């Protein structure tokens, strides 16, 4: 195998591994309290409930039967997170083959296989005009250019890497709006300096990020460097990749459990027992919306956040939310 082909093979394996690790990270740090999920053709409709004092909530496994839909929900609105929290893993895997890494903004093409629509508990559609997406440009040492996109599943694209020209042609516009790799990491660090709810949430993410990197370090010390794993023969690589993913997931889940027991991952606000009971009751009411109240025609015609007077999709006008 020539050197260029070997580098591409490593790149594809690195992107596939990082994407799988990010799915693990997102499931452990899932932060959308989804109480109802509906599939309507190429649309995936998510209904969000009310929160208590938790930063992270269990992924709604019982509401999502399809594996691809699960991946789409895991990475929905988390494209920047992928490069903020997978930065160490990516550097370790790409250090032997890449000359340059650039964070960049992109705009998905109109004809995507999947469209996710999220509705707040008020019935108002969230992010109805959302078009911005984030990905990573990779320049290999032979000069060839690729795009790593770890969160394309939210649009129905699951391939984590492709040549930049192909990416631009079939998937999303490749713009010149780029930053040196690490932009998203620095952005998260700036958020954490502020005294806001978002800073509390990001601080909890940062705790899991440290556990994640500790798990990677433990793996490299006890097994092998990540970049060496990518050079294994095919069967050995896939076997080792699965062991890595399982090892990291178990390490981080154990660490998160200890943090939960100490209360390190909760918001500063502490709801009363009555508050918790009221939120639970309202979330249950949202989840029990009848099929007639959310039929396909009504959802398709709903103008979303652009119409502040129309919040009939959830049909919860009778609830004092």
Image: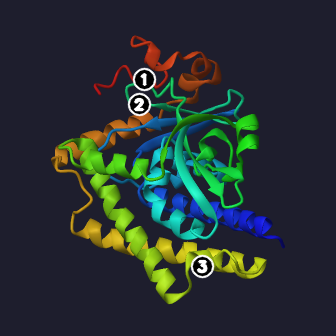
- N-term mark: 1 or 3: 1
- Please identify the quarter of the rendering in which residue 320 is found: top left
Viewer-nearest residue: 251 or 53: 251
Disc 2 is placed on an element classified as: loop
Q: Position of residue 41 (x, y in %)?
A: 70, 32
Q: Could you tell me how far apart the alpha carbons at marks 3 and 2 are, in whole angstroms?
A: 38 Å
Residue receiving disc 2 = 120
Q: Position of residue 144 (x, y in %)?
A: 72, 53
Q: Is residue 120 left or right of residue 269?
A: right
Q: Residues within 10 Å of mark 2 (few under 14, many from 20)?
A: some
User: Which residue is depicted at the point 66% across and 53% down?
Assistant: 160
Q: For the N terminus, which image quadrant?
A: bottom right
Q: Is residue 230 left or right of residue 279?
A: right
Q: Could you tell me how far apart the alpha carbons at marks 1 and 2 are, in whole angstroms?
A: 6 Å
Q: Could you tell me how far apart the alpha carbons at marks 1 and 3 are, in whole angstroms?
A: 43 Å
Q: Is residue 160 above or below residue 239?
A: above
User: Which residue is depicted at the point 33% across and 36% down?
Assistant: 282
Viewer-nearest residue: 27 or 123: 27
Disc 3 is placed on an element classified as: helix
Viewer-nearest residue: 259 or 185: 185
Q: Are marks 1 and 3 in contact (CB under 8 Å)?
A: no
**How many numbered discs?**
3
Q: Are marks 3 and 2 in contact (CB under 8 Å)?
A: no
Residue receiving disc 3 = 243
Q: Is residue 77 above or below residue 208?
A: above
Q: For the C terminus, which image quadrant?
A: top left
Viewer-nearest residue: 268 or 15: 15
Q: Are marks 1 and 2 in contact (CB under 8 Å)?
A: yes
Confirm whether residue 173 shows in the render. Answer: yes
Q: Which mark is drawn over residue 124? A: 1
Q: Is residue 165 left or right of residue 245?
A: right
| Extreme-right residue of the structure | 1
């Amino acid at each position: 195998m020539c050197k260029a082909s070997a580098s591409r093979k490593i790149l594809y394996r690195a992107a596939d591994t990082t994407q799988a690790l990010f799915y693990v990270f997102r499931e452990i740090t899932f932060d959308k309290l989804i109480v109802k999920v509906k599939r309507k053709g190429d649309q995936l409709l998510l209904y969000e409930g009310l929160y208590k004092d938790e930063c992270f909530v269990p992924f709604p496994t019982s509401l999502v039967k399809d594996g691809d839909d699960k991946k789409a929900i895991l990475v929905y609105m988390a494209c920047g997170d992928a490069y903020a929290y997978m930065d160490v893993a990516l550097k370790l895997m790409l250090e032997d083959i890449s000359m340059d890494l650039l964070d960049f903004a992109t705009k998905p093409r109109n004809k995507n296989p999947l469209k996710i629509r999220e509705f707040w508990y008020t019935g108002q559609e969230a992010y109805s005009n959302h078009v911005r997406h984030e990905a990573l440009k990779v320049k290999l040492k032979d000069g060839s250019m690729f795009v790593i996109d770890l969160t394309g599943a939210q649009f129905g694209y699951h391939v984590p890497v492709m040549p930049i020209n192909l990416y631009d042609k079939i998937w999303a516009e490749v713009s010149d709006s780029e930053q040196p790799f690490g932009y998203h990491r620095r952005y998260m660090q700036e958020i954490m300096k502020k005294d806001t709810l978002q800073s509390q949430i990001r601080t909890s993410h940062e705790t899991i990020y440290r556990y994640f990197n500790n798990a990677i370090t433990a793996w490299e010390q006890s097994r092998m460097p990540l970049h060496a794993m990518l050079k294994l023969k095919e069967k050995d690589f896939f076997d080792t990749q699965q062991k890595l993913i399982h090892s990291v997931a178990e390490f981080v889940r154990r660490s998160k459990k200890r943090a939960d027991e100490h209360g390190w991952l909760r918001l500063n606000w502490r709801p009363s027992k009555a508050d918790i009971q009221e939120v639970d009751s309202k979330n249950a009411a949202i989840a029990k919306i009848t099929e007639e109240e959310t039929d396909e025609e009504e959802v398709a015609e709903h103008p979303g956040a652009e119409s502040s007077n129309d919040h009939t999709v959830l049909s919860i006008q009778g609830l004092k939310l």
